[in-house]
Amino acid sequence: MGKQRRQQNTNNRQIGLIIVLLIIVYIISQFFKLINRNDISSYQVKEGSLAISSVYTGIAIREEEVFQCADTGYINYLAREGEHLACGDLLYIIDQGGALDELLNQGNLGENSLSDQDLSNLKTDIINFNSAFDKSHFSEVYDFLYSMDGSILKLVNMNILNELDEGQTDINLDLVKLNRAPKAGYVVYHTDGYENISENGITPEMFDTEQYERQQLINNTLVEQGQDVYKMITSENWMLAIQLEEERALELMGETYAEIKFLSTQETVWAAIRVQQMGDSFYAYLSLNNSVVTFCNERYIDIELITRNEQGLKIPISAIDYRQFNVVPEAYRIDRIDANNSTFLRKTFLEDGQQSSEIVSVAVYAEKEEGIYVDANQLKIGDYLLLENSMSENAVSQIGELVGVYCINQGYAEFRQIVILYQNDEYAIIQKNTPSGINEYDYIVLDASVVSPDDFIFE
């Protein structure tokens, strides 16, 4: 009896030790599971919008006319680049004897030859150039240098012209030729060979800005008779041609107006839009009737094309997951329990091998033309579904993919399908009132990669 009692006590101690060890193992496993668990953040779904936009480089098509010099000599511009001149306004001087250059080099115009307004205008030009400067287009620095040099010399030349009018110099006026604008327009001091380009003349090669060259017309230099000396933009109406991807071109075919943003100025305007295919290339032509003076010195202009705003439920891209489901024919559904659950008749076999059947309740995630998307763990590939009161059967064999998010309103990760209307790199706009979907003010998992279906959410 004593020996049996000691043996029983030993067995009890061993059982107790095993239980304690199991409890310790469980506690340790839960501890490591806790410290290794990714933090799960939630996101409340709300209505919002996303603008569909893309950045393009446009080629400016304007009414431009290049003018040549009527005489040989040193040219001195009197109009500032981008200035609007009326027909007959003084534009430049041709100094055939070099006397103006000599007068300029004498430096006797005084320290205050530039007015406060002149200095303010020059300062504004410098600030605007600095704010829009892109290091990848460093050559623009030289164009700006020539432009500033021309602007300053133009102001100085006006002072010289005043002295000529007042007879304060002994310069032979017969050697000084005054030239006036033959028509109204904005004056520009460079040429690039694109002055006469039309819509039908646009080619894919023209969008390669690395191959673009322009000839800067420099103030106070010797020019020959017949040489290009300036050009004029003679209309406020102009156009931007952009090259489109085929998919985007097809989207814009039916549009008549588009909203665009000039990236250098952040100004937003509306333009009439027309899409055309030439060969294998697609182009959009954006017609404008303002801002021509702002970009009169530029052939290539970067814009953001905004065609419409998509409205719907706004969610982060990180919340979206793609999950596979088994797809079964709708005809085999027995009953619809509710919006998210249905019953099916599945074929089974008894222990003696005889065929039987059972009714199973299955979670439904979507209903589409190809069938009902069900949980793959509840109706597996190879299961046979039966029609009631019929010998017809169908094997589960089709797999489909749904895009969705994990709703955590009930405290666990419940997959809900979504329909994406539009997305960018950060957010997606999804359709409202999707069957078995999500609604405004639902809570979803912010990062779908840190959860699995039906995970309980600890917060």
Image: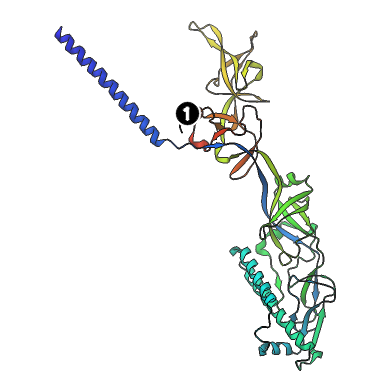
Secondary structure under tag 1 reads loop
Q: Position of residue 312 (x, y in %)?
A: 66, 38
Residue shown at 71% from the left, 65% from the top:
298
Residue 144 locus on image (x, y percent): 65, 71
Against 197, is 347 above or below? Answer: above
Residue at the spot x=34%, y=26% of the render?
26
Task: Name the residue nearer the viewer: 41 or 212.
Answer: 41
Q: Amino acid at mark 1?
A: Phe
Q: Is residue 12 left or right of residue 29?
A: left
Furthest toward the left, the residue is 2
The image quarter containing residue 19 is top left
Residue picked out by circle 1: 456
Residue drawn at x 55%, y 33% as measured from the top left: 443
Q: Quadrant of the N terminus?
A: top left
Q: Is residue 273 above or below residue 444?
A: below
Q: Is residue 98 visible from the viewing direction of this image? A: no
